[in-house]
Amino acid sequence: MSSNPEETAPYGGAPTGSTTATAPKAPIKRIRTQHLREMKERGERFSMLTSYDQLTAQVFDEAGIEVLLVGDSASNNVLGNTTSLPITVDELIPLTRAVSGAVSRALVVGDLPFGSYQASPEQGYLTAVRFMKEGGAHCVKLEGGVEMAPQIERMTRGGIPVMAHIGFTPQSEHALGGYRVQGRGATADRVLRDAQAVQEAGAFAVVMEMVPGDVAAEVTSKLDIPTIGIGAGKECDGQVLVWQDAFGLRTGRLPRFVKQYADLRSVLLDAARAYDSEVKDGSFPAPEHTF
Ligand code: KIV
């Protein structure tokens, strides 16, 4: 064991606090559900990203992202499944704990996976309790509108803040007939009804996925709770993206609503190739890396 407290723990370990030596030391206010509502009332936008691990959570928290979602998209982006359906509560809770333990400011949302809340309000409540107790989540997210009102009411009554998710809901991919924009034409009313039902049931915010911009704008103006868009245009109160999509770690065709802010895959690929070639030509480790 090193006696130098500055030294990073071997293999990553568990560094605490800011990732930047020059980060401000001012007390950081924790984002609470009511702060998002106050931001909506003031006409201020907020941002949300997925995060599934300690180190990205620290970086996104330091960047000022208000909300971190430990999404069931970890199924595709961490566990290598092709959809979000297979991931389990037992697989998501440790990721939630890693994220909630790493942030000092962001609101951490635990995403209830497929099959863990749809059966009944009681099933949903008990699952949500696990995310709060074992995962350290500050609130939970579930997919569905009108039909999920009893679940949202039960959780809210039991002291658990709920973020709803309407429009395209990936857990219902097969029921919805694939990845499709929801709420076009005559079905726009359905999106509004879902939004009003989840607000009425007690949700503190609602994600709208793949909904036409004008429909999302109307929902946003009619609701008191904040809306968070993903493929729902610029009028939502907040925006969310899956971080591997936004920062270019994932390859392949990205949905149209994703903007890529970095090309991390190329950065990592170049670094891995440089390491590989230095190991093979004997230039790593150099004397300064050797005890
Ligand atoms: O799991 C997830 O990443 C999500 C976002 C797409 C909102 O639900």
Image (spheres, rainbow, N blue to C red):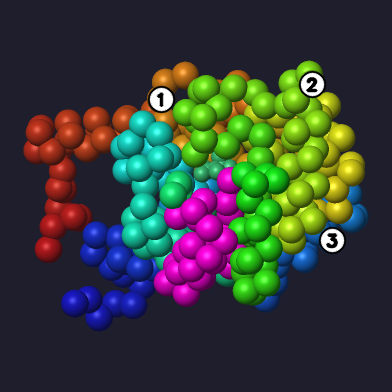
Res. 289 in view: yes
What amino acid type is highlighted by mark number 3? Glu
Tell me if residue 229 is in the magenta stretch: no
Residue 22: horizontal and vertical position, in percent?
57, 64
Q: Residue at x 67, y 67 (%)?
A: 156
Q: Nearer the viewer, residue 95 or 58?
A: 95
Task: Decide: few, some or many residues near mark 2? Use Cα within 10 Å; few <14, some 14-19, many ≥20.
Answer: few
Numbered label attached to residue 251: 1
Residue 1: horizontal and vertical position, in percent?
19, 77
Q: Which residue is mark 2?
A: 186
Q: Residue at x 74, y 21 (%)?
A: 184
Q: Residue at x 10, y 33 (%)?
A: 280
Numbered label attached to residue 38: 3
Q: Secondary structure at mark 2?
A: helix
Numbered label attached to residue 154: none
Res. 235 in view: no
Q: Are marks 1 and 3 in contact (CB under 8 Å)?
A: no
Q: Are marks 3 and 2 in contact (CB under 8 Å)?
A: no
Q: Which residues are magenta?
A: 116-143
